[in-house]
Image (tube, helix red, strand yellow):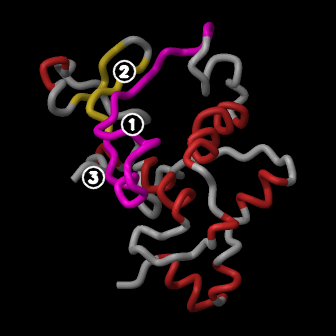
Amino acid sequence: MAFAGEFFVERYGAEAASHAPPIRQMLDAGIIVGAGTDATRVASYNPWISLYWMVTGRTVGGMQLAPAKNRLSREEALRLYTVGSAWFSGEEEVKGRIAPGQFADFAILSADYMTVPEEQVRRIESVLTVTGGDVVYTADPFTGFAPEPPPPVSPAWSPVAAFGGYQR
């Protein structure tokens, strides 16, 4: 089974694939960019897959698409997920930063995104997620803090309700 990156290269060629999408050029031109998962069954719900792609230029299948000049630093990629996406939703005054007056939603991660080897970025998971002051997800060693019952899937139409999350 071929991955989307392989189809793109086959159809348009490696040169076109190395520029799609041109995130580095967009940032260099001063364009505000936000990142996300699209939350579809086609794209992974896992933000670490997208962050891995932006940092390494490699697909989930390991195919190298983006050359070094078109990739982002870890800090830049994370900023697109946080500050960039908050700007697009018009919520930059309350989301996207760790700062006074901003929502205090957070996750404790299984590894340090800034220091793990690149190949491990896509394997990072939340082991504790807090939103609105409530624990909404736990994994070892935080399972003792798990909410009972677990909060409902939001939005209710999300495929996560039928297919589960991206973990293992």
Q: In which quarter of the image is the N terminus?
A: bottom left
Residue type pointed to by label 1: Ala
Give how far across and how far down residue 28 sits, in percent. 82, 53
Which residue does the image show at 29% across and 24% down from the upper left? 151
Return the mark for residue 163. Answer: 3
| Span shown in magenta | 100-125
Q: Which of marks 3 and 2 is nearer the N terminus?
A: 2
Of all residues, the one furthest to the top in this rendering is 100
Residue 102, compared with residue 120, is above or below; it is above
Give how far across and how far down residue 94 sits, in percent. 64, 17
Q: Does the magenta stretch include residue 120?
A: yes
Residue 92, compared with residue 59, is above or below; it is above
Question: In the image, 72: left or right of 132?
Answer: right
Of all residues, the one furthest to the left in this rendering is 144
Q: Which of marks 1 and 3 is nearer the N terminus?
A: 1
Which residue does the image show at 73% across and 58% down from the upper left? 24
The residue identified by callout 2 is 130
Q: Distance between the residues labelled 3 and 2?
A: 22 Å
Secondary structure at badge 1 equals loop
Q: Are marks 1 and 2 in contact (CB under 8 Å)?
A: no
Residue type pointed to by label 3: Phe
Question: In the image, 123: left or right of 97?
Answer: left
Q: Do the residues labelled 1 and 3 touch (CB within 8 Å)?
A: no
For the residues carrying marks 1 and 2, which lies nearer the camera in this image?
Answer: 2
The residue identified by callout 1 is 156
Q: Distance between the residues labelled 1 and 2?
A: 19 Å
Secondary structure at badge 2 equals strand
Q: Does the magenta stretch include residue 146?
A: no
Give how far across and how far down residue 48 sits, in percent. 43, 49
Which residue does the image show at 50% across and 83% down from the upper left? 6
Give how far across and how far down residue 44 sits, in percent. 42, 56
